[in-house]
Amino acid sequence: MANLADRGNQVACAACVMSPLCKSPVIANGAPSPVECRRRVAAGERLYAAGSARESVYALRAGFAQVSVDEGHGSHVVRFLLPGDAAGLDAFAGGKHGNEALAIDDCEVCVIPAYRAELLGRYSEATCTALRSLLSAQLADSESHAVTLARLTAPQRVARFLLELSRRWSERGFSPTHFRLPMGRRAIGQHLALTTETVSRVLSDFQARGWLDLPWREVRILEIGKLRDVLTATPVLEKSH
Amino acid sequence: MANLADRGNQVACAACVMSPLCKSPVIANGAPSPVECRRRVAAGERLYAAGSARESVYALRAGFAQVSVDEGHGSHVVRFLLPGDAAGLDAFAGGKHGNEALAIDDCEVCVIPAYRAELLGRYSEATCTALRSLLSAQLADSESHAVTLARLTAPQRVARFLLELSRRWSERGFSPTHFRLPMGRRAIGQHLALTTETVSRVLSDFQARGWLDLPWREVRILEIGKLRDVLTATPVLEKSH
DNA sequence: CGTGCAGTTGAACGGGGTCAAGTGGCGTGG
DNA sequence: CCACGCCACTTGACCCCGTTCAACTGCACG
């Protein structure tokens, strides 16, 4: 496995959504760290499998991963994980994971057993609240993604996808206009409910218009305003209200 | 406003997802009930508006409502609320509600201020866990809905919609084959990412095949197995006669 | 009555899926 | 070293499902 630090994707723990847990004040008072261990996961391997017992949540420290669900109609990529993102939160409800997380790149993850997270929450109201916030934020994201699938055209979906990646990278202190795009066209299609062909065509089109440059599994956004314009153009389905 | 009990949709609090909070053992020990008050909301009114401050979560005691998001591309109905369902959970993260809840029927809701829910959670681990479960379950539901939008054909979406309503009504002790369908075709379309015309056509088709009977804003499912077949059939539907 | 909205149904269009062929990078083995 | 196969991606041609546009029905309410 290559040296992960070389890839330039490693983030400080400060940018991690799980930092309220790791930095919980009760730890200073002797409570154990929520992180049981760090695991390396090679590209193509799973962080956890669908149907596996809910035991832990995961924080991605380095690398790139995707969370997908498969209910028998083909797999749908629910979200992509950047360093600092959490996965496996869905399983606080039942006993089993309803989705799986797959490493796209070689990854390094912090394994946080659920009982440890809950233990911290019991002794620190702030930590408990942080855990709820995390769930709540993912719920809002998920509902927002439904809007993408429900109401946007193919070019709008791709534009929104790129703009969201741009925002997420810049939140982590990286360039909002030039970043890696390590997932394949197929995975992008499974995320946006498009075929690989359509994803490819739209990206080619954006590139032909001079809005993007697409080196191998990278993006360089040249005209971010044009991408935003695509999003604000006329909706397709019925107008509301 | 009509007598809600007459509608036959009122549920015992035992079937409510919020009952772990209302029935929390710490209340027996003198803690206050999480329910601040009960409110009546007339059909067409909002339980809460998008962008309003996060103050409370809501449990639907009677009636029928829908949760929708509008990000400027037209509104998408994220889910329909049956008696016993909760709404407003999305806002545990930020300060504002990202979606709105609209009463389809005349409704009665329990208003549960967030601080009261959190207070109960602080003194009862079981209650805190119940709150997490609720969020977690809605997240799983939301991801599952994304699969509906991403990978199913129009007849499959409608079939799944009906089967899910059937399951939810039967969980509440009502008939799984005969229930009210109080939302309009437009709202169903906004939920499933279809036009009203398509929803209407698919329902008419199901009815023509003898799988359903559709009195005014009701459904009577006659061949529930056929609806399940539609969902499991990978190949395209063949037309009858 | 007229006006309005919800629902149904028909006809035609088009965005994106499907199928198919072609390209280029990369690993493997001769 | 090149030959070969593999796979991700691209591009073109065609087609189908669901949208769009439009007409019509029925019920509610002034």
Image: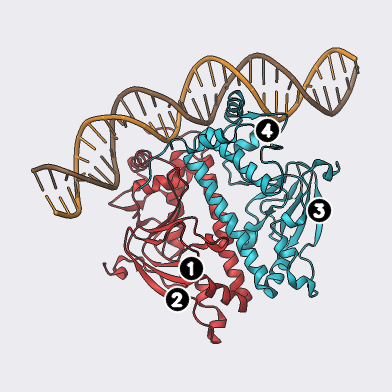
Chain colours: A cyan, B red, C brown, D orange
Q: Mark 4 vs mark 3: which is more N-terminal?
A: 3
Helix, strand or loop for disc 4: strand
Q: Residue at x 49, y 35 (%)?
A: A153
Tell me the distance, in whole angstroms, between the alpha carbons under discs 3 and 2. Answer: 46 Å
User: Where does label 1 land, which residue?
Assistant: B56
Callout 4 amino acid: Arg
- Looking at the picture, which amino acid does disc 1 mark? Ser
- Of badges 3 and 2, nearer the viewer stands 2
Q: Looking at the image, which is closer to me, B160 or B195?
A: B195
**Where is residue C5 drawn, in percent x and y?**
26, 47
Tag 3: residue type? Arg
Looking at this view, is A58 or B98 the one in front? B98
Task: Look at mark 3 in the image and give the residue it sits on.
Answer: A39
Residue of label 2: B36
C-alpha distance separating marks 1 and 2: 9 Å
Residue A97 can be seen, yes or no: yes
Q: Give, as a three-letter code, the residue at label 2.
A: Glu
Q: Give me the residue at 54% from left, 58% from top.
A: B138
